[in-house]
Amino acid sequence: MAPDVAFRTLERQRAAANPPANGHEYPALQRLTAAHVDSFNALCEPPAGPSVPSGGGGAGGGLLELAVADIGVKAVFDRKAAASGASRGNKLLMWIEDVQVGRPMVPDRDKHSRNRLIYPAECRERGVSYCGKLMAKVCWSVNDGPVNSDRGPAYTQFGVQIRCVRPDQSSQTVTLHYLSDGQVVFRFSWRKQEYLVPAVLILKSLLAVSDAEICDDILRGEADTWILERVEGLLRAHKGFGVYTRDQCLAYLGDKFRVVLGLPADFKDREIGEALLRKVVLVHLDSRRDKYNLLVCSLRFLSPPVKAIPPGASLTLARDKYIIKTLNKAPGDIGQKLKYFLATGNLVTGTGLDQQQMTGFTIVAEKLNFYRYLAHFRCVHRGAFFATLKTTT
């Protein structure tokens, strides 16, 4: 008589494909493989012991954050010094911060999945890598300082800059500047000339909204009296223009920019105002409602104490091309090297990383039986270097 043995293969497969949210299906296996899983979690999560302060002055994070903090700052000058002590021109500093690894998810082109998360069981069946997107914030500064505050005595280092691309691939860059008196101005360039327009005037020109609606859209239900006072200051300053309806705001803009836009003389002020919004304000969006929502979101982001990275003045075309050329030198897929390392165990590095070996860092887990497979998660790999020693047994 055959022994009554239940392998529960389908049950384990269902648990692996749809893991429970309240814990592990098999706590004993979770404890057995904890050291292996925690070694990968250490890339993104802080250690369980006392936190290690990061190089950027933060509270300390995973190994990836500490490694990025150790990269430092890259400096680039726009001219070469002809002699010792000569000026090198403007200095551009670039550094990386706030690196995050996203959750493994289905591709963006998949529009039908309800649950977009994927798990290792699905990746094994499909023959794909269990990986997520690596996102990083690239920061830059010109001449060791925030450029926005150098534009005038009322300017602060806070600003939001948006580069919009039209369907014909031409671009229009706009900037929201936060002033020291609490006002916000909308800056754009037209035919190599810069113009400043109060942000509330742009909002009221886009949609027929009241002051209460603008205030509610910016606050979004948050009971923050400090931000409420700033918004009230913006609306109070707008009263000085003497325009209250959308038609009045459009006519006011059209009267001020009639000569600048160079439209036909028989155009009414309101039509010129509409043309200004269409040609300058967030040109990548067609709907006036979408433009309004994006400006409101930018104003919400500008409200201190939110920390905004100073975008600074627009770089010249030469610098823009230099940055693109520099970024193109880097490999397009940063995770490809990590995939190669995990697949082959060969370490490709220019510094050596103070390692005694460059190969044999990974072992393929054999599944001749379940116990041998589990043994890989608890064994200690001494390294390929020790295999070359005569004293090795």
Image: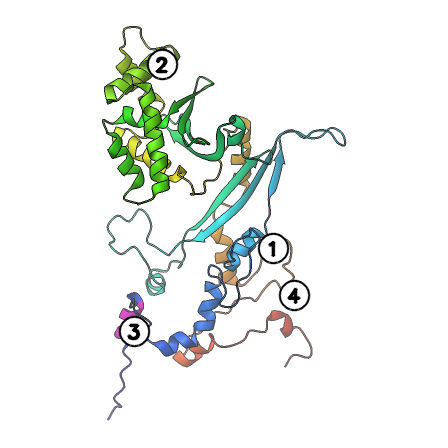
Does label 3 or label 4 sit earlier along the sequence? 3
How crowded pointer 3 is (Cα within 10 Å; few <14, some 14-19, many 20+) is rated as: some
Residue wearing tag 3: 12
Q: Is residue 80 magenta?
A: no
Cα distance, mark 3 to mark 4?
Answer: 41 Å
How crowded pointer 4 is (Cα within 10 Å; few <14, some 14-19, many 20+) is rated as: few
- At 28% from the left edge and 33% from the top edge, which residue is drawn? 214
Residue wearing tag 1: 349
How crowded pointer 1 is (Cα within 10 Å; few <14, some 14-19, many 20+) is rated as: few
Does label 3 or label 1 sit earlier along the sequence? 3
Cα distance, mark 1 to mark 2?
Answer: 60 Å
Query: Start and end of the magenta stretch?
Result: 10-16
Q: 385 or 87: which is nearer to us?
A: 87
Image quadrant occupied by the C terminus: bottom right
User: In the drawing, does residue 305 fall left or right of residue 240?
Assistant: right
- At 37% from the left edge and 56% from the top edge, which residue is drawn? 104
Residue type, label 3: Arg
Q: Is 367 placed above or below 247 here?
A: below
Q: Residue furthest right?
A: 84
Q: Secondary structure at mark 1?
A: loop
Does label 1 or label 2 sit earlier along the sequence? 2
Question: Percent x, y for residue 324?
Answer: 51, 35
The label number, if any, that marks residue 27 in the structure image: none
Q: Secondary structure at mark 4?
A: loop
Q: Is residue 15 magenta?
A: yes
- At 34% from the left edge and 65% from the top edge, which residue is drawn? 121
Residue wearing tag 4: 356
- At 61% from the left edge and 62% from the top edge, which residue is drawn? 358
Q: Secondary structure at mark 3?
A: helix
Residue type, label 1: Thr
The label number, if any, that marks residue 256 in the structure image: 2
Q: Is 297 placed above or below 251 here?
A: below
